[in-house]
Image (cartoon, helix red, strand yellow):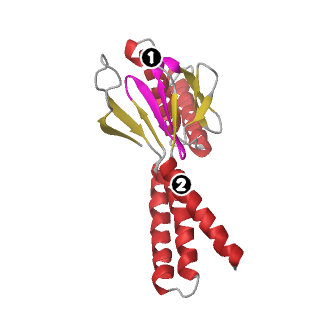
Amino acid sequence: MTTPDQPSPVQGPTQSVSPDRVHRSPSALVAGVLLLGIAAWLGADALFVGHGRTPWLALAALLLAVPLVIAFTLRPAVLANDHRLRVRNPFRIIVLPWGTVAGFRSGYSNEVVVESGTKYQLWAVPVSLRARKRANRARLRQNREAGGAGGRTSLVPSGPTRAQTDQIMDDLDRLREARAEAVTSQGEVTVKWAYEIMAPAAAGAVLLAILLAVG
């Protein structure tokens, strides 16, 4: 789930280049590729073989569906380096210098919280309740085994018995604690809307609505 990425751009005159660590959801990537393949197959058939309004309906549906599939499967990513956290969600990119991050929260979703109290969901690091329960069972089993071997229950390191997404959140929080006071980790939170996703999806929705309205 974690892969090295190209170095991030220098953000200031005194800020050195720091390589990003990229966190993404493998299951979302697989689902996105499969859905795009199905859309290409069905869409091409309707565009080149369909009659009457069918090609236009297929074009409108593709304009609407393809950007949304990309937005919710292939696009989400969390990129962290020594200076900032960059959260790429379906329709926004949020850049948070470490000095502005107050912490992380994990419940039914994983979130980053800034000093002002604003929360941003980490779409690329989804919570798996099944994996979390499995990790908890493994931790309890290891504790019982350690207690039986030593005559008392000992604490087992959490790394091997943590759900993968929970481990990612731990790693991000440790990086925040280490870099929050650095001069190069100061700045303001910036939010950029993904118009390259929203514009074609909106155009497809409008075209589809018109075609359905005119019958």
Q: CA distance from mark 2 to mark 1?
A: 33 Å
Given residues 18 and 159, the one toward you in this image is 18
Quadrant where the C terminus is found in the figure: bottom right
Counting from the top left corner in percent of width and height, residue 77 is at: 46, 42
Residue wearing tag 1? 186
Q: Residue 41: image x %, image y %?
A: 46, 75
- In this rendering, the answer to whether 42 lies above or below 162 is below
Which kind of residue does numbered mark 2 sit on?
Ala
Which element carries disc 2, helix, strand or loop?
helix
Q: Earlier in the sequence, mark 2 or mark 1?
A: 1
133 or 50, which is in the foreground? 50
Q: Residue 22 lies in what quarter of the image?
A: top left
Please tell me which residue lies in front, 6 or 55: 55
Magenta stretch, residue numbers: 81-100
Q: Amino acid at mark 1?
A: Gln
Task: Tally the numbered discs.
Answer: 2
Instruction: Quarter of the image for the N terminus: give it.
Output: top left
Magenta-colored stretch includes residue 82: yes
- Magenta span includes 60: no
> At which x and y percent is residue 50?
52, 85
Q: Nearer the viewer, mark 2 or mark 1?
A: 2
Q: Residue at x 50, y 43 (%)?
A: 124
**Residue 142 seen in the figure:** yes
* Residue 106, horizontal then vertical, whole percent: 61, 32
Is 123 left or right of 108, judged from the image as shown?
left
Residue that label 2 marks: 199
Question: Mark 2 packing: few (<14 Cα in 10 Å), some, or many (20+)?
Answer: some
Instruction: Confirm whether residue 163 shows in the render.
Output: no
Q: Judging from the image, what secondary structure is the residue with disc 1 in?
A: loop
Mark sitting on residue 80? none
